[in-house]
Amino acid sequence: MAVKIRLTRIGRHNEPIYRIVAADSHYARDGRIIEQIGVYDPSKGEENAQIDEALALKWLGNGAQPSDSVRSMLSLKGIMAKYAESKKKGKK
């Protein structure tokens, strides 16, 4: 099972809100998910995305691949740097 960390759309017409989720890459964008990691409201900007850091690091550690937009949000929050640092510690 190839797991991706990606966005699923919720919200009203012309007012999208996205959930940041871990989902099997074979399922539809708004289909079945494995676990919700956070919420992103584009009207507030990427820096205001609410992401559970522990869950994000757990899924990255398990091999989940973030989409481009989620990767930029994780980088803004400093989660990608923490993940890279933990990978370096594990190799030593």
Image (cartoon, rainbow, N blue to C red):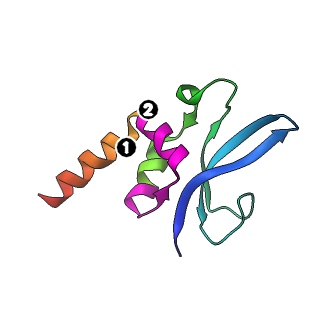
Q: Where residue 69 sits: x, y (%)?
A: 54, 44
- Residue beneath label 1, please? 80
In this view, 37 is above or below 13: below
Residue drawn 41% across and 63% down?
Answer: 62
Q: Amino acid at mark 2?
A: Leu
Q: Is residue 75 magenta?
A: yes
Residue drawn 88% across and 38% down?
Answer: 13
Overall secondary structure of the magenta section: helix
Residue sitting farthest toward the right:
13
Q: Amino acid at mark 1?
A: Met
Residue drawn 31% across and 40% down?
Answer: 81
Q: Where residue 49 sits: x, y (%)?
A: 58, 32
State the CA–CA distance, disc 1 to disc 2. Answer: 8 Å
| Pointer 1 local density, CA inside 10 Å: few below 14, some 14–19, many at least 20 | some
| Pointer 2 local density, CA inside 10 Å: few below 14, some 14–19, many at least 20 | some
Bounds of the magenta span? 59-76
Residue sitting farthest toward the top:
44
Q: Is residue 54 magenta?
A: no
Residue drawn 28% across and 48% down?
Answer: 84
- Residue beneath label 2, please? 76
